Image (cartoon, rainbow, N blue to C red):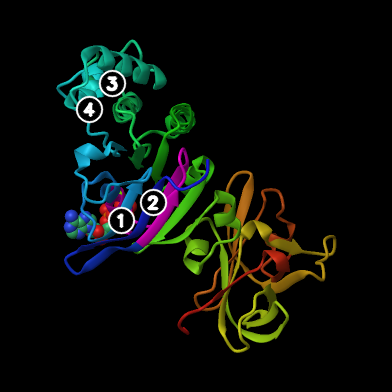
Amino acid sequence: MSGAYLVLSGVAKRFRDHAVIQGLDLTVAKGEFVSLLGPSGCGKTTLLRMIAGLVACDEGRIEVGGVDLTRMPAHRRNVGVVFQNYALFPHLNVRDNVAFGLRAQGKPTSEVDAAVAHCLELVRLDGLGARPVGALSGGQQQRVALARALATRPRVLLLDESLSALDRKLRDTMRIELRRILRIEQITAIFVTHDQEEALVMSDRVAVMNAGRIEQFDRPDAVYARPATPFVLDFVGQSCSIEGRVASRRDRQMAVETPYGALIADGDFQVGESVLIGVRPENVRLVDGAMPSHAADNVIRALPADPVFLGSRRMIHFQCKGADRLLAELPGEERSAMDTDQPVSLCWPVERTLAYRRDAPG
Ligand SMILES: Nc1ncnc2c1ncn2[C@@H]1O[C@H](COP(=O)(O)OP(=O)(O)OP(=O)(O)O)[C@@H](O)[C@H]1O
Ligand SMILES: [Mg+2]
């Protein structure tokens, strides 16, 4: 899995005065599984529709396997699409739904039959070919939609919230099935989901999108542990965020003045610059006599506000100032220090302390 296969360069789309996709670049390798993650309205579906040829690009270029698709009509692109609502043909049975694209391409019957049988086997629906699609469960319909998209052996498969309508258990199964099928068929896929866990678990790389741009494109562990921007820190997973100002700097380490005292973070911003400090809540620990903090820790004192029990863990929110957010994820049984209304000491390693430049003050 290397090199450039699907390449978007400077792609832009505007609906009237609304720039929905803004000079977007993305390079995906052959066989790679990429998730697009981003808030509602950030342009995920629009981007998929541009790749599929259902929405024209205003600017930029879309290339797959060295072929320029930018001006190619949708039906010639051979890009498979699975939408959330599956959009199956209700008057056709399973086999005819899956065969549809191949027949439209004028493929000989023997070839169509072989491909349909292969795809139904892949999605484990062999035996249901003659069933009307209206007589299938949601999960089965989802598999038919996938088989239909796979039948023409697409260059790229685009999946727009394709698992969202399924119940939790079926989704878990379908995630594994989908990855298995795409690996067997060596298909490059872009997957849109609202479910972060789904994106982090399934993807080779995750693209985090905000307002028509990609803010970070990286491996799931890197996106989570080293968010490139405050937006990614906030959008992917839970996080603490604390506003401050650089008070001093030595080499690549800064002392940041915050309402909770000085915090140390790696970075080379100028003294006086506004900074946003970020920490993942699972890196935050409570300090008590039994577990002293290390010299390499940042330590602050805060008053617990709102413990939320999550089964095996607890998420504790702390009172803080302004737009700041302080929370700690603790093992479910670790409650002693939290049973008081007294401030407690929280600490986390300097090396887990993220620092971002804040563009505008306040
Ligand atoms: N045909 C259209 N005409 C005008 N505006 C549109 C059109 N299609 C989409 N938009 C606007 O473009 C923006 C992005 O829409 P898009 O459907 O791509 O978002 P999305 O990221 O898929 O959101 P969601 O997660 O809710 O599905 C929205 O503000 C939407 O209203
Ligand atoms: Mg959408």
Query: Residue reaching furthest left?
Result: 91
**Secondary structure under badge 2?**
strand
Residue 314 coordinates in the image, percent (x, y): 62, 52
Which residue is tagged 4? 101
Question: Which span of residues is magenta-colored?
Answer: 24-48
Which residue is tagged 1? 61
Residue neighbourhood size for the residue with mark 2, other residues' Cα within 10 Å, grouped as few (<14), some (14–19), many (≥20): many
Amino acid of disc 2: Val
Whether ligand 2 has any atom under 8 Å from the Cβ at mark 4 is answered as no
Q: Which of the labelled discs sits on residue 7, or is there none?
A: 2
Nearer the observer: mark 3 or 2; the answer is: 2
Residue neighbourhood size for the residue with mark 1, other residues' Cα within 10 Å, grouped as few (<14), some (14–19), many (≥20): some
**Upstream in sequence: badge 3 or badge 2:** 2
Nearer the observer: mark 3 or 1; the answer is: 1
The answer to the question of whether label 3 and label 2 lie on touching residues, with beta carbons closer than 8 A, is no
Which residue is tagged 3? 136
Residue 277 coordinates in the image, percent (x, y): 60, 73
Question: Magenta segment: does it hold 34?
Answer: yes
Label 4 to label 3: alpha-carbon separation: 21 Å
**Secondary structure under badge 1?**
strand
Label 1 to label 2: alpha-carbon separation: 8 Å
**Upstream in sequence: badge 4 or badge 1:** 1
